[in-house]
Amino acid sequence: MPQTKKSTLVLVAERAGVSIASVSRVMNGLPASEQVVERVRKAADELGYAPNATARSLKAGKTEQIALAVADVGNPVYVGMMHEISRVVTKAGYRLVLSSTGSDPQDQIDLLTALNRGFADGLILSPLRVTEQLGEKLAGSRLPIVIIGSVPPGVELDNVRADSATGMGLAVQHLVEQGRERIALVNGPLDTVPGAARLGGYLRALEAHGLPANPEAQVAAKDFTYRAGLKAAARLLDQCTPDAVVCANDLLAIAVQKVVTSRGLRIPDDIAIVGMDDTELAELAQPAITSVDLGSVKRAKTAARLLLRRLDDPQAPIEQVVIEPSLTVRASSVSGARESGL
């Protein structure tokens, strides 16, 4: 005879060593101590108990909510993605719920565990780091998921990604065309998906143009933020003298610009700078920063479309989409440049 919800709650409470009321509070997302939450969730997972919150809603079986999980809600790229996804899913009758998970895969695993209890109808996830454990959790999720970024090996999920390696090639080619020969890289962490892709693209582009890959001209910031970029840029200029710097995103490019000018160097005469993502920050900087557009808005729109399609038809074939990059040339890499898209 199948267990009733009440009997399962009792079992979870006994396993966790807490009251039934405490179990109910945790399962309903109400305030509880960190220790109680951990014990209840562990017990529930061990017993295979995943209460469906949507069953409690007036529209049985649906929350009409879609979750978006990104690493940093302060990053302009993610802000732009959020607005575009919200626009698309709102038209389809869904609310968008935003979660900032940081770059730790365990935070994303915890979010997946919570969402699988029925607090959203689908998830759009943009992970910076992908571990084997996260891949297993994604593969075993009952929740429809679309990944913005690369899909872990062996995981069959809809995804849309940027071709950042090709984007890096566009940046290096542009700088070579401007006569630059000592092209450095300010990257983000190399153990992240974008960090690894950008490094690979940079090295291949240097090789294609017959330029040396000087290890001292390659620095990795602690993360993809402006503050981390300041330290990375200072380290770069302390150990080499580049005539151009390609940066893994626009926040890092602005940091490089700050450090370069603080040392009395001229942009682009002494050092040219190219960023990635082509955010408003690049356009507003002085001088405006040449940047690779990785199609963040297109990726967001496509991801939203893929998830809505998956919600309408769970058996639809897996779709994987690559958005091609383009280059917007501004004053940071060409003296007297007028903005142009390449």
Image: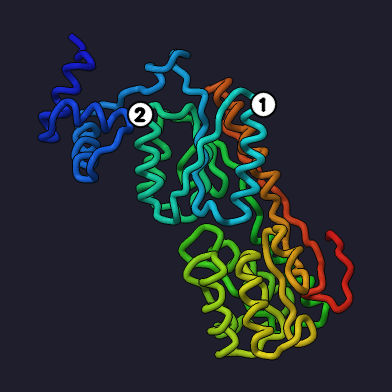
- Its colouring scheme is rainbow
Quadrant position of the C terminus in the picture? bottom right
Question: At 59% across and 50% down in the image, what residue appears?
Answer: 78
Q: Amino acid at mark 1?
A: Lys
Where residue 147 appears, as percent x and y from the top left, is 54, 42
Residue at the top extreme of this rendering: 1
Q: Quadrant of residue 216?
A: bottom right
- Is 201 displayed left or right of 266 in the figure? left
Badge 1, how many Cα within 10 Å: few under 14, some, many 20+?
A: few
Q: Is residue 7 above or below residue 296?
A: above
* Disc number placed over residue 183 in the picture, else none: none
Amino acid type assigned to the residue bearing label 2 in the image: Arg
Q: Residue 254: x, y in percent?
A: 65, 71
Q: Position of residue 23 (x, y in %)?
A: 21, 29
SS for dot 1: helix
Q: Is residue 208 left or right of residue 158?
A: right
